[in-house]
Amino acid sequence: MPEGPSIVILKEAVQQFKGRRVIEAGGNTKALDPATLEGQTLTDFKSWGKHFLICFPAFTIRIHFMLFGSYRINEQSDRPARLRFQFENGELNFYACSVKVIGEPPDEIYDWSADVLSPTWSAKKALQKLKEKPALLACDALMDQQLFAGVGNIIKNEVLFRTRIHPLSVVGKLPPEKLKELVAEAVNNSFDFLEWKKEFTLKKHWLAYNKKLCPRDHVPFHRANTGKSNRRSFYCEICQVLY
């Protein structure tokens, strides 16, 4: 599943189609009749966490890539497209993703201050939301898109390792400075992820995710599906403190 930084990269890559008219549309989506998009002018692209937003004057199409979704710019896959756009200057294709039509303006739907990569991100709001959920596990807090929109399982593991927090730690038991560190590192690692993804060096920088040994203590990482999200965690029982 693409994390927030990958969606930002997509948003940057499709700017060539902003302001363009859809010449032809297709795909096997059931969310709308693609033919109704023909002749419409695409006004903007936005991203919120893992959501990619394609904006038209009267509505917005939300793309969520789920576990196996993908896209192609100015080329096609051999798989059936879920949604396809043809423009005078190229094409945009989406595969195996979730498509939803949003009638309300995005600003009425999305809290941009919750997106860790947004210029309007608010660490203050994130801290307040965390304090209102003291029973939440650290692993679930980072995966909560209303708290940290854009953070996925890779970033979760890296943040917990870098902050030395055990994934099963309870948010309400984290010391105040450690809670602030968790919030700050969620943002820092997301921007690092974005930079490394653009450089095609992301995997070289992983310290915990999908690793076998803790680079600090040189002992095997414990691997388990943790929290309500039930996603895989890689953690060291020595250096990551259980609060």
Image (tube, grey):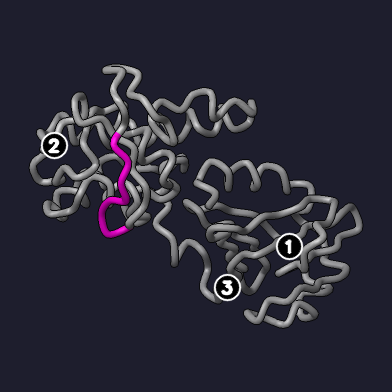
Q: Residue at x 73, y 48 (%)?
A: 14
* Residue 41 vertical position relative to residue 125 in the rendered view, above or below: below
What residue is at 58 percent from the left and 65 percent from the top? 62
Between the residue at mark 1 and the residue at mark 3, the CA separation in whole angstroms equals 16 Å
Q: Residue furthest front?
A: 220
- Residues 16 and 167: in front is 167
Q: From where the camera sits, is residue 51 visible? A: yes
Magenta stretch, main secondary structure, is: strand
Crowding at mark 3 (Cα within 10 Å: few <14, some 14-19, many 20+)? some
Measured in 3D between alpha carbons, the distance from the residue under mark 2 to the one under mark 3, in whole angstroms, is 40 Å
As helix, strand or loop, the secondary structure at mark 3 comes to strand
Q: Give the residue at x 65% y 46%.
A: 10
Mark 2 or 3, nearer chain start: 3
Residue 184 visible in the shown view: no
> Toward which corner of the image does residue 55 lie, by quadrant?
bottom right
63 magenta-colored: no
Mark 2 Cα-neighbour bin, 10 Å: few <14, some 14–19, many ≥20 = some
Numbered disc in front, either 2 or 1: 2
**Where does label 1 land, which residue?**
42
Image coordinates for residue 68, horizontal then vertical, percent: 60, 58
Residue 130 located left or right of residue 155: left
Where is mark 2, residue-wise? 242
Amino acid type shown at disc 3: Lys
Mark 1 or 3, which is nearer the eye? 3
Numbered disc 2: secondary structure: loop
Across and down, in percent, residue 5 comes to 53, 41
Relative to 108, residue 12 above or below: above
Residue placed most toward the observer, 92 or 54: 92
Which one is in front, 65 or 85? 65
What segment carries the magenta color?
Answer: 222-229
Residue tagged 3: 100
Q: Amino acid at mark 2?
A: Leu
